Image (cartoon, rainbow, N blue to C red):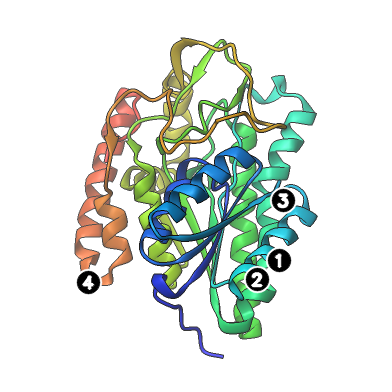
Amino acid sequence: MKLQLKPIEEQVLVITGASSGIGLVTAKMAAEQGAQVVLASRNESDLAAAVDEIRSTGGRAVHVVADVADPGDVEEIATTAFRSFGRIDTWVNNAGVALYGRLLDLTLEDMRRQFDVLYWGVVHGSRTAVPYLSREGGALINVASVLADRAIPLQGNYCAAKHAVKAFTTTLRMELEAEGLPISVTLLKPTSIDTPLFDKAKSLLEVEPQPVPPVYAPEVVARTILECAQHPVRELNVGGSGRAMSAMNAVAPRAMDLALEKAGFDSQQTDKPYHRDDNLFTPLQHDGGERGRNWEGRTKGTSLYTRAALHPRAATLAAVGLGAGLLAGFRALRGGRRPEQ
């Protein structure tokens, strides 16, 4: 069967991690464009509120309370989608949890739990989705991170999990293509995004964590996800600064080490004291919302690089954006700052 992805208004989308941040914004955006949406996460109250909001404006949506670390829960997501809408056209593995601290200070229990969500959640979702997507063709979209290309201090376990997601996704794509299955497999690598992920993170730091600037709005990722649901994309950075970071790491990894040793610790920390619960093992009440509380700086609402990369006719703009990002990146390395793009 030849791969032919449907327009978004004709699709049934499954989105994990859909009660807040990127997942929530993507679900709302897809529903606004006419898609039927299945929202999944651990937080029942926030999921129900999101579905009510979508339905109040004429959208079609259902929710499933599920922990992606549990393969049985993930199977229930697919069962609910099929029972409610009759098929699955796009599956987005997006669920995530954050954990801050030096690697040797983290407990093995916490590290394993984060891997269960970030890596095994993608594995469970992908294995569940493929049989459904192969029936009529569809898209599997795994949301990783720019940290799948480059590790940083204080988030070493997160980086390791995202590296694993990248390897898993790359291998799965090759194996499905070799079988001739009509499934587009996409790896997305967002840079810093303004979501509640940081507000709910477990941290061994004495202060609240924050995304490293430049920071992009979750709508930038949501638009990219919906583009990839309609047009096959192999792998893509979301945010030009992330592409520049990946490129710099490829050509000057030792320089990146030194720059991050100098600037990679303080840039991830606010001056707000850390004393609250986290959602590593248990969801927090009313932890939803599209944006986070810990980031108070400028948020970029678009990425020239990502827009250009999604549209081949604009490849020249992408090259210009990347060149500017690389130049800014090397200047930032000399000054000990992350590049802005």
Q: Nearer the viewer, mark 1 or mark 4?
A: 1
Q: Position of residue 92 (x, y in %)?
A: 55, 59
Q: Tell me whether the residue at label 2 lies in contact with that at label 1, contact meaning CB atoms closer than 8 angstroms.
A: yes
Q: Element at badge 4?
A: helix
Which residue is labeled 4 in the image? 313
Task: Report the number of numbered marks.
Answer: 4
Q: In this view, does 318 lie to the left or right of 8?
A: left
Q: Distance between the residues labelled 3 and 2?
A: 23 Å
Give residue 79's mark. Answer: 1
Q: Give, as a three-letter code, the residue at label 2.
A: Phe
> Which is more N-terminal, label 4 or label 2?
2
Mark 4 vs mark 3, CA separation in Å? 37 Å
Q: Distance between the residues labelled 1 and 3?
A: 19 Å
**Who is closer to the viewer here, 288 or 302?**
288
Kindly check if marks 1 and 4 are in contact, taking CB atoms under 8 A apart as contact: no
Residue type at mark 1: give it. Thr
- Return the residue at label 2: 82
Q: Is mark 3 on a helix, strand or loop?
A: helix
Where, by quadrant of the figure, is residue 138 drawn? bottom right
